[in-house]
Amino acid sequence: MSERTAPTDPRRGSYRPKGRGPRRPVRSLAGQLFVVQVVIVAAVVAGGAVLAYLFAADRTEDAARRQVTAVAHAVADSPSVRTAVTGPDPTALLQPYVEQVRADTGVSFITVMDTGGVRWTHPLPDQIGRAYLGHIDRALAGQTHAETYTGTLGPSVRVVTPVWDDRHRVVALVSAGLTVESISAQLSGPLLALVGVAVAALAVGGVGTYLANSRLRRHTHGMGPDELSHLYEYHQATLHAVREGLVLLDRAHRVVLCNDAARELLGLAGDLDGRSVAELGLPEALVAAVLREEPVRDEVHLTVERVVVLNTSPIGTGTGAGLGRVVTLRDHTELQALSGELDSVRGFTEALGAQAHEAANRLHAVVSLIELGRHEEAVEFATAELELAQQLTDRVVAAVSEPVLAALLLGKAAQAAERGVELALTEDSRIDDGVLPPGLSARDLITVLGNLIDNAVDAAIAGAAESPDPPEVTVTARIARGRECGGDAAGTAGDCLLLRVADTGAGIAPGAVEDVFRRGWSTKQDGRGHGLGLALVAQTARRNGGTVTVGRERGAVLTVRLPLAVRPSGPAGSPGDPAGRPDGSTGRDREGALA
C-alpha cells in the first residue's frame, strides 16, 4: 500500500508524509533575528551594567580611602592628641575624643596606638590595650600607609599615619578605616538604580527589536532563510527560463532586472543594472510607451530587428504601490510575417473571387452574343479579354523567374485592378531564377514588396481624387550593380536586388520624410491602426543589410536595395551603416530626389 501524503501550508508549497509525526516548525527569518538581537541587547546591557558596577565600586573605594586618610591626618595633627600621647594615661583623654570624631565623620573606627602597636583607643573597649592588627612599619618610618586588611571589625579600608612631636619624632600612630560592609552599603543605592536602568534598557531594546522584526516578518511573509534562499533561486531560474522578455524598472525608470529573452528581443548587451531605460538606445516610440503612466496592453512596436508586443504594469498594491513597473515583451516577428502572408493570401482570394465574378459576367455576355447569332462578335470579345489578362501574366513571368516575386506581383496586380488601379512592371525589370541568395527569405520579399505596393495603391487611389490621370503604380524589380547599389565609381559595392515602387499619388511631404518609417506614421485618418507597413519594410531591409530611400517623380518613389551577398546589419546608428537610422531610412536619395 502506497504511503499517502497530506498537504501542509500552501504558502510553503511542501508536503508532509502522513503518519510520520508533526513536522518540526521552522522559525522564520524575522524570528531568528529577533532571538539573536535580544541576546545581543541583553549581553550588551549586562556587560554595561557589570562595567558600571565595577567602575562605581572602584570610585567608592577611592572615596573611602580619601575619607579615612583625611580623618587620620586630622586626628594625628590635633594638638590635644599630641599632648595626650605623651601623658600618663592617653586612653582617658583620647577615647572620648576619637569616638566623637568617629561619630562626626562616619568612619568605622579610629585607633590611636603607641609606636609598638598597642591600642590606646578602639570602638570596642575590650580591644584597648591589645595589639593593632595591620602593618605599621611604613607609618613608623614617617609615611602614611593605606591598605585593606581584616581586623577586629572585619575587612576594612584603613590608613595608618604617624603622630609627630615638637622635635619631629614619631611618638604615636593613628589609624582610621571604613569596613568593606559599610562601603558595600554605600553602593546599594547606585546598584539598585543601575539595575533599574539596565532592566529599562533591556525592555526598550526588546520592544524596539520586536517592532523592527514584526515589520521584517510582514515583508518576508514569515518565511525562513532557507525558504527565502530557495525562493530567490526559483525566482532567478524562472525569470531567465521564460521565453517572454521581462524588464523590471524602479521608480526612476532604471533597470532593476532584465532577463535573457528581453536582452535578445531588444538587442541589449552588457551590464544594464541601474541604467535608465532612456539610455538603452531603444526606439523612441518604444521608450515613450514604457514611460507612459497608464498601463500598456498588447501594443506592437519595432526594435532593430524584431516586432514585439509590449505590456506594462505597475509594481505593488497598497503600501507597496509605486515601486516601479513590470515590462513584458513577446516576439511578434514571426506572427507579423505570417499575418502579412495571410493578408496577401486573403487579398489573392478576394481578387480571384472578383475575377471569377467578372469572368462569369463576361461569360454570360459571350453566351448571350452566341444566342443572338453574333458568333464573330462573341469570339472577338472573348479573345480580347483573354489577351488583356494574358499580357500582364506573360510580362511578369518573362521578366521575373523568381516564383515568389512573380506570384506576388500577379496577385497584387489583380488586387490593384479590382480597386481601379493599374499596376505596371517596368521594361528593365528582370530577375532570373536562382539569383537571390538563400539568406534572403521569401517571407522577407513578401514583407518588403507587398507593403510597398499596398502603400502605393492606397496613395494612388487617394491622389486620383485630385488628378485627372488614372491611378497607376509602377514596379521595378531587377538586379543592380555598382553605384546603383551604393558603391563608388569603381562599383565596389557588389550586386543587389533593387525593388522600386512609384505611384501617382500626392507624394510624401518634405517635412514628413524623417517620420515615414517610424511606427504609427500614416496619411490615413480612418483610425484603423495604420502605420506599421513601411516600418516593417525598413526593419526587414536593415536586417538583410539593405537600405530604403524615398524619392519623388509623379508621386512618391520608394526604393529598397538588398545586397545579394547578405551582410549582417550593424547596430543602429553605427558609422558607415547605410541603414543606421532607427527608422531604416538613409536620408536624401543618392539620385538627388527628396528622401
Image (cartoon, rainbow, N blue to C red):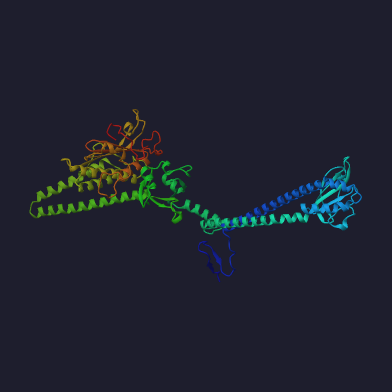
Considering every residue shown, the one lying at the far bottom of the view is: 1
State which quarter of the image contains the N terminus.
Answer: bottom right
State which quarter of the image contains the C terminus.
Answer: top left
**In the figure, 565 relative to 325: above or below?**
above
Q: Residue at x 87, y 46 (%)?
A: 83
Question: Seen in the image, is 527 located left or right of residue 135?
Answer: left
Q: Position of residue 251 (x, y in %)?
A: 44, 48
Q: Tell which of 545 and 382 is nearer to you.
A: 545
Considering every residue shown, the one lying at the far top of the view is: 489
Question: Seen in the image, is 324 located left or right of residue 461?
Answer: right
Considering every residue shown, the one lying at the far right of the view is: 88
Number of numbered discs visible in the structure rendering: 0
Q: Position of residue 9 (x, y in %)?
A: 52, 64
Q: Tell which of 299 and 202 is nearer to you.
A: 202
Q: Position of residue 224 (x, y in %)?
A: 56, 58
**In the figure, 322 relative to 16: above or below?**
above
Q: Position of residue 14 (x, y in %)?
A: 53, 63
Q: Residue at x 81, y 46 (%)?
A: 73
Question: Seen in the image, is 417 located left or right of residue 285?
Answer: left
Q: In the rendered image, is residue 179 in sight?
A: no
Q: Residue at x 84, y 43 (%)?
A: 143
Q: In the rendered image, is residue 316 in sight?
A: yes
Question: Seen in the image, is 148 located left or right of residue 1?
Answer: right
Q: Tell which of 124 and 526 is nearer to you.
A: 124
> Which of the 4 image quarters holds residue 540?
top left
> Which of the 4 image quarters holds residue 168?
top right
